[in-house]
Amino acid sequence: MHVSAKADYGMRALLVLTTTYADDPHRLVKGDSIATSQGIPIKFLEGILRQLRQSGIVASQRGAEGGYRLDRDPHLVSIADVVRALDGPLAAVRGQRPEDLDYSGESEHLREVWVAVRAAMRHVLERVSLADVAAGALPPDIFELLSEPGAWNRR
């Protein structure tokens, strides 16, 4: 899986908003404050926050007292929600959904592999919320994946 800069930056911005939400769900955070604290280019961040607002994950308010906040409880926003909002479907093959592909001959069963990859990604990304990541409290079976042999090794 390739995690785009947009998804990475979006997650980092949302984790700032998650921490703020825990203190006061209505408190607004300035975009430049998020950009500075996370080392994200402000213009890129503004586009990301606009997409997250259009997806109903973030709310914004203009003006001197304006800023951004989560529009949903962070326990109800999965990592999959964020990736889909910013990058589209979790697993696409050449821009198509894996179940829509048609292979023949020696490649006949490749579609099943791509669907299984999507299912594995869903298993992790749909079960982990912003609140889980902010608290460092991943679901136990997801946390167990970190201790699998080779999990931390580059390949």
Image (cartoon, grey):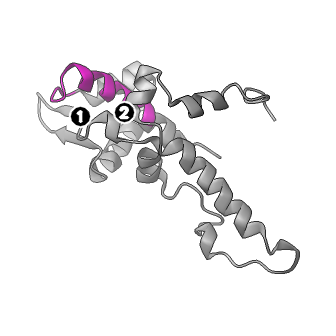
Q: Residues within 10 Å of mark 1 (few under 14, many from 20)?
A: many
* Residue drawn at point x = 17 percent, y = 26 percent: 27
**Can residue 29 be seen from the camera position used here?**
yes
Give the position of the C terminus as an image quadrant. top right
Q: Residue 60 placed where, x, y %?
A: 20, 40
Q: Residue 74 placed where, x, y %?
A: 32, 34
Q: Residue 49 placed where, x, y %?
A: 33, 42
**Can residue 13 be seen from the camera position used here?**
no
Q: Residues within 10 Å of mark 2 (few under 14, many from 20)?
A: many
Which residue is label 2 attached to? 14
* Residue drawn at point x = 23 percent, y = 41 percent: 71
Instruction: Give the label on residue 43, or none.
Output: none
Please report contact status of discs 2 and 1: CB closer than 8 Å, yes or no: no
User: Magenta segment, principal secondary structure?
Assistant: helix
Q: Secondary structure at mark 2?
A: helix
Which residues are drawn in magenta? 11-28
Q: Nearer the viewer, residue 27 or 39?
A: 27
- In this view, 53 is above or below 89: above
